[in-house]
Image (cartoon, rainbow, N blue to C red):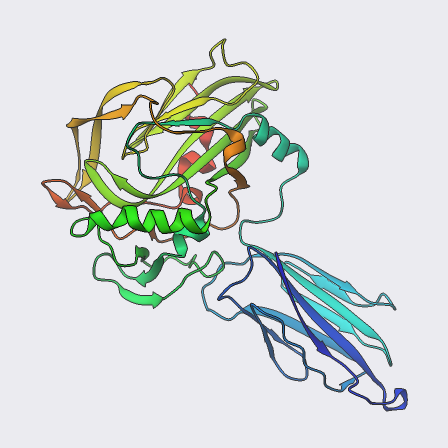
Amino acid sequence: MAAVAVAFGASGASAAEGTGTIVVRLSADPAPSRTSWIYGGLPSPVTLGNGTTRRAIDVPARTYTVRERPSLAGAPATLTALACDDPSHDSRGKPASAVATIAVAVDETVSCTFVHRALGPPPPASALALAERFAPELRFAAGEQYRPIAMEQYLGVATLRNGTPPSGTFAQERPTLFTLPVQALPSYLDVRDAQPNTTAARYPAIEASIVAARPRPTVYWRLARQASTGRLALEYWFLYLYNDFTDRHEADWEGVTVFLGDGSPIGASYSQHQGRQWTPWGAAQTDEGPTVYVGRGSHANYPRAGTYRVRVCWTLVRQRCSTTRKSDSARGDGDHLGPGDYDLHELGGTGFTGGWGSGTYILSIGRSHDRVTDPRRRSDYSNPFAAVPS
C-alpha cells in the first residue's frame, strides 16, 4: 500500500492573515503505479499518483469541498475509506461521494486521507481465517508450464484495446486494476508480443519473466452466503497467463468452490472447460481444503488424479460442442502448490467488463466469438450455490 501527500499551508504567513494548512493523502492497494486521482475544490486542482509531491500555498481559513475523481474516465470506483484528522473536529469525509468537507481554522492543519483498494474493502478477519482453513492444494501434471498469477502481473504484460479482437484500437499501454473499464463498451486485454494463433511459442518466455519478477503464485478467494439455507461457499479462483489446449487463448480463469453447511464441508465444485463438476465431500478430507488435480494446458480442475476425455464448446455463428480427441492429463505427477506456497487474496471490487485475452482459437477451426470473462461477471461467482444438487 502506497501513501502520497500534498500539503497546502501558510507558507510563512502570520496568524493574523487568517490562514491554515490542508494535507491531502492518498493510500492505495496495490501501489498506484501509473494511476492517479485529481482533487478539485482546493485553491488549485491537484493530481496525486505514484511518488510523493508537496506544495505549500496560503490557504484562507474557511470551508473547502474537496472532490476526488480518477484521472482516467470510465475507471472503476475504488475508494473504500475517507477520513479527516481535524483538531477542531468539524471536517468530514464521505466515501460514497468521494467528497471531503474540510473546515480550516486559523493556524490549523487538517489532514484528509483517501483510501483506495482495487479489490474492495479488506475482508473481516473471520472470513480470511475460513479461506485459509480450506485453501486448496493444487497438483499439476508433468509438463505444465503455467502457474496461477496475480491480476496485476497479467496486466503488466498486456495492453488494453477497445473494440473486439483482433482488430481493436489501442486504449491503454499499461492498464492497472484501477483503470480497467467497467462501462458496457467492448474492450479486451492483449498480451504484448504474442498471439495464440501465430506466435504461441512466445508465451512460456513471458511466463518465465513474470515468475522471475515475483516467484510466489497467487490464489484469489471469495466468501458467499446463502440466506435461505445458511450455507457458505468459499470460492477459489486461479488466473493463468495462457490456455494451451484444443482451444487456445490468452488468460485462463478457473475455480474451485468449497461448500459448508453448519460449519462443515459438504462438497465442492470444480471448473472444467465450460462447466462445473459437483463432488460430495469425502471422509478422508475432513477439515482441510480439497486436493485439486489440474489438467495440463487446459487448467481444468478434477477431484481425483486421472486422464479425462472432454467436450469443448465454441461459438462461430452459433454455439457448438464436441468431444475432443485430446484428453485432460490431470495425473498430478508434476509440481504441486500447498496453501503455504501461494499468496491468498480476496477477489472483490468491480469486475472488468472486457475480455481477458485477445481471442479464443479452436485448433483446425479458427477464431471463435468466445472470450474469457472476468470471474466477477460470471454466475458461478455471484451464485455459486447453483452447483449444489437440490
Asked if residue 74 lies left or right of residue 94, the reply is left
- Tell me the quarter of the picture where residue 116 sits: bottom right
Q: Position of residue 208 (x, y in %)?
A: 35, 47
Front residue of 206/325: it is 206
Q: Is residue 69 above or below residue 270?
A: below
Q: How many callouts does the rendering have?
A: 0
Front residue of 121/304: it is 304
Q: Position of residue 264 (x, y in %)?
A: 58, 17
Which residue corresponds to the image point at 37% horizontal and 57% vertical from the top-left? 184
Assign the N terminus to one quadrant of the image.
bottom right
Q: Is residue 214 above or below residue 76?
A: above
Q: Residue furthest right?
A: 16
Q: Is residue 317 above or below residue 320?
A: below
Which residue corresponds to the image point at 34% horizontal and 61% vertical from the top-left? 159
Q: Position of residue 53 (x, y in %)?
A: 63, 75
Asked if residue 134 lies left or right of residue 62, the reply is left
Assign the C terminus to one quadrant of the image.
top left
